[in-house]
Image: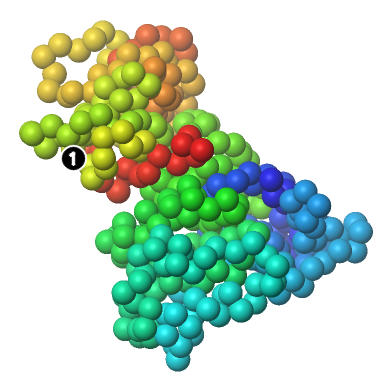
């Protein structure tokens, strides 16, 4: 477990954060100016904080109290930046080899063949970066980071420069990285989809402080946090693919609750994570009859978070997992919703976008 404790003052800004990053992807999530890059820079060794300790067991990168400050090149980190930052004059193969060049000779390392295979970059090995798409460059950058035998991977908004199509192309590779490689990954993001798809752990930052951290499903399902604001709120369900039906629907099993979604490209038996946006969930006190929606989940209302505007976010505990619903305050009153109230959550099948569905993630471990 990587443990990070930092205190650092800039004029008008104070970072005072403690983050625990277990194996998997730990997403640093927060608005612009919350302090994410400052934390990444401190971990990378590009910023020496006023006070701090960054360590994983007996591997200590920084301990200001003991005067330990490893230099950036001593830290054994793999970086994946927004833009791939590949060397333009080198082929893909040479770029990949460059990562391995700096790895200590005795370090346990990923095999080139395995990395090339995992990232699907075999056909690109003899090309130079100018002949790669943005998504391909990013896959090579992931490979180069992995082949440097890092003890930690830092990914600072690695998808931010890509369009939606390219993001969708790269996300599965980050999922594989999370699920197949045992290196902790510290991942900075603004995007709700990325957090929902990738995060094992989420640390939410606000004005230099960690206001909430924990397992992704817990943090994203907490209506008191809503780091993206109420409009972007959504919870994560984990489910197994059961079958693809001839009418274009895929049937999932979420803890013995059937869920129907538009066709998803995963094999029966595979685990998936599904982000259910709060605005796609309606609530009813009685079990609705004669409704076209296929997904009707009985549950119990938990926290009720009233916004400043007309909206409210309700957390509902269902057998399939925790859901969030965004409804009006007026509906909260009309339904007489209070914590403990029995409700039915209605998820409109077609509204779940393919980008909201990702590989199984940490539950598979
Ligand atoms: N070198 C510096 N000198 C003074 N202030 C700084 C410096 N670097 C960052 N800051 C301030 O610290 C705060 C946190 O910045 P930081 O870049 O960590 O935020 P962020 O969460 O990464 O934002 P973004 O998502 O926009 O990249 C901001 O108010 C920023 O202006």
Who's the residue at 48% across and 47% down the image?
Answer: 179
Indicate if the residue with disc 1 has its beta carbon within 8 Å of ligand 1. no
Who's the residue at 46% across and 74% down the image?
Answer: 84
- Percent position (x, y) of residue 233? 40, 38
- Percent position (x, y) of residue 311? 37, 31
- Percent position (x, y) of residue 27? 54, 50
Q: Residues within 10 Å of mark 1 (few under 14, many from 20)?
A: some
- Percent position (x, y) of residue 325? 36, 27
For this orientation, the residue located farthest to the left is 247
Q: Quadrant of residue 91?
A: bottom left
Q: Quick one: SS at disc 1? A: loop
Q: Is residue 285 visible?
A: yes
Left or right side of 58 for 133 = left
Give the residue number, with chain letter if any, for mark 1. Answer: 263
Q: Is residue 311 visible?
A: no
Who's the residue at 30% across and 48% down the image?
Answer: 355
Who's the residue at 49% across and 50% down the image?
Answer: 180
| Nearest to the observer: residue 137 or residue 345 | 137
Q: Quadrant of residue 109?
A: bottom right
Left or right side of 206 for 264 = left
| Nearest to the observer: residue 92 or residue 351 | 92
Is 300 rendered above or below residue 277? above
């Amino acid at each position: 477990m990587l443990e990070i404790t930092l205190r650092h003052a800039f004029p008008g800004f104070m970072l005072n954060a403690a983050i625990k990053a277990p194996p998997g992807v730990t997403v640093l999530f927060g608005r612009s100016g919350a302090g994410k890059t400052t934390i990444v820079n401190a971990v990378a060794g590009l910023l020496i904080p006023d006070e701090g300790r960054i360590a994983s067991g007996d591997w200590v990168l920084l301990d200001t109290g003991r005067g330990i400050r490893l230099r950036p090149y001593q830290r054994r980190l793999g970086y994946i930046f927004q833009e791939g930052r590949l060397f333009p004059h080198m082929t893909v193969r040479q770029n990949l080899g460059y990562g391995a060049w700096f790895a200590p000779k005795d370090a346990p390392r990923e095999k080139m063949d395995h990395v090339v295979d995992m990232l699907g970059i075999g056909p690109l090995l003899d090309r130079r970066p100018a002949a790669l798409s943005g998504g391909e460059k990013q896959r090579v950058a992931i490979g180069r980071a992995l082949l440097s035998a890092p003890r930690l991977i830092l990914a600072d908004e690695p998808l931010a420069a890509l369009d939606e199509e390219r993001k969708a192309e790269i996300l599965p590779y980050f999922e594989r990285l999370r699920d197949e490689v045992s290196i902790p990954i510290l991942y900075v993001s603004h995007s709700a989809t990325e957090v929902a798809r990738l995060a094992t752990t989420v640390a939410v930052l606000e004005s230099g402080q960690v206001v909430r951290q924990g397992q992704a499903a817990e943090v994203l399902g907490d209506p008191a946090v809503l780091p993206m604001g109420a409009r972007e709120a959504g919870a994560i369900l984990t489910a197994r693919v059961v079958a693809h039906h001839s009418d274009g629907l895929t049937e999932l099993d979420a803890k013995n609750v059937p869920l129907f979604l538009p066709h998803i490209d995963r094999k029966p038996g595979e685990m998936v994570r599904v982000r259910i946006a709060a605005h796609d969930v309606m609530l009813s006190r009685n079990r609705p009859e004669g409704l076209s929606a296929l997904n009707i989940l009985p549950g119990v209302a938990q926290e009720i978070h009233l916004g400043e505007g007309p909206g409210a976010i309700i957390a509902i505990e269902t057998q399939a997992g925790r859901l969030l619903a965004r409804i009006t305050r007026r509906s909260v009153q009309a339904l007489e919703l209070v914590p403990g109230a029995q409700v039915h959550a209605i998820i409109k099948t077609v509204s779940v976008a393919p980008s909201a569905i990702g590989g199984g993630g940490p539950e598979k471990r």
